[in-house]
Amino acid sequence: MIIAANLKANLTRAKTVEYLNELEKFLSAKNISQEVLVFPAVSSLNSHAGCAIVGAQNAYPTKNGAFTGEIGVEHLEEFGIKTILIGHSERRHVLGESQKLIAQKFDFFSKLGFKIVYCIGEPLEVRKSGNEKMMSYLDAQYEGIDTEYENLIIAYEPVWAIGTGLTPTLEEIEGLHEELKKKSFAPLLYGGSVKVTNVKEVLALNNVDGILVGSAALNVEDFCMMIESAQNLEK
Ligand code: PGA
């Protein structure tokens, strides 16, 4: 399974080094065979040798250039980073990224062979407006995205479940994952308030190929426990 930590604007460079050291100790001590991804803040990116894969939370679709406040692929290449999150709900809803820009990023980084964790998810008012509207909202998030891209991982993260402690029911997650699997064969992660106490149930669901964890992954011991739950689950 794929177990990913989105560290967001948390953990400084020094703290990220400690985090990754602890994580690597755990991964080798327990002989973990799961795919583990970590997305540190941009200023905490560094070359990383180990079992975990370090990816970027964001980058601009350019090699370099006049894009104040952004980084380009050159900055990722310096550290051997070939994995990126695209379409996270905080970039869509807090930073105002349009589907057009998201699709441009997808196109740019897929052409470079990056592993892409592509996030989709609906806000609460959309969910409340009924299944049909919700599915067409999610459909629109596939616009301009090559769903057959070989290095694609999709993460379904309901916006209202991110960082709130709220989650859909297990039946709702399973039902939605079943629907989303019809759109792409890519591994499908669930994200949104996954934590040590609910990780086993979420991972056990049909069509859940892993998890993308924010808040609960900030504590490396907790993240390791979640990885261990995946390891222990025969799936
Ligand atoms: P959360 O965040 O686990 O804090 O809900 C998940 C995410 O934003 O990827």
Image (cartoon, helix red, strand yellow):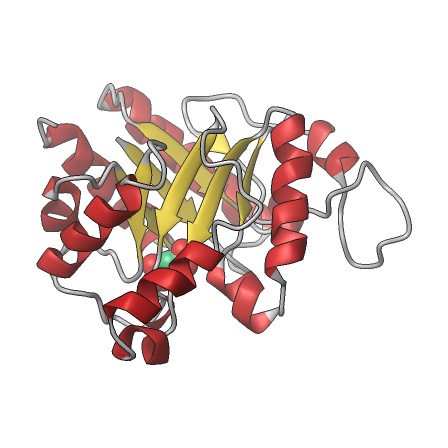
Say which residue appears at 45% left-offset and 40% top-offset. Answer: 38
**Which is nearer the eye, 59 or 54?**
59
**Nearer to the camera, 59 or 123:** 123
Quadrant where the image shows the C terminus: top left
User: Relative to 33, does residue 152 appear above or below in the rendering?
Assistant: below
Q: Is residue 109 visible?
A: yes
The answer to which image quadrant residue 182 occupies is top left
In the rendered view, tell whether residue 128 sits above or below residue 221: below
Q: Work out whether residue 32 or residue 170 is closer to the camera in this orientation and state it.
A: 170
Q: Which image quadrant for residue 30?
A: top left
**Relative side of 87 to 35, left or right:** right
The quarter in which the N terminus is drawn is: top left
Q: Position of residue 107 (x, y in %)?
A: 65, 38
For image coordinates 38% across by 73% down, the residue present is: 123
Which residue occupies 66% across, 27% down? 111
Q: Is residue 172 left or right of residue 190?
A: left
**Residue 203 x, y percent position in the rendering:** 16, 42
**Residue at (67% x, 54% y) in the render:** 101
Question: Can residue 121 be seen here?
Answer: no
In the image, residue 227 above or below residue 8: above
Q: Give the quarter of the image for residue 26.
A: top left
| Image x and y of residue 155, in percent | 37, 47
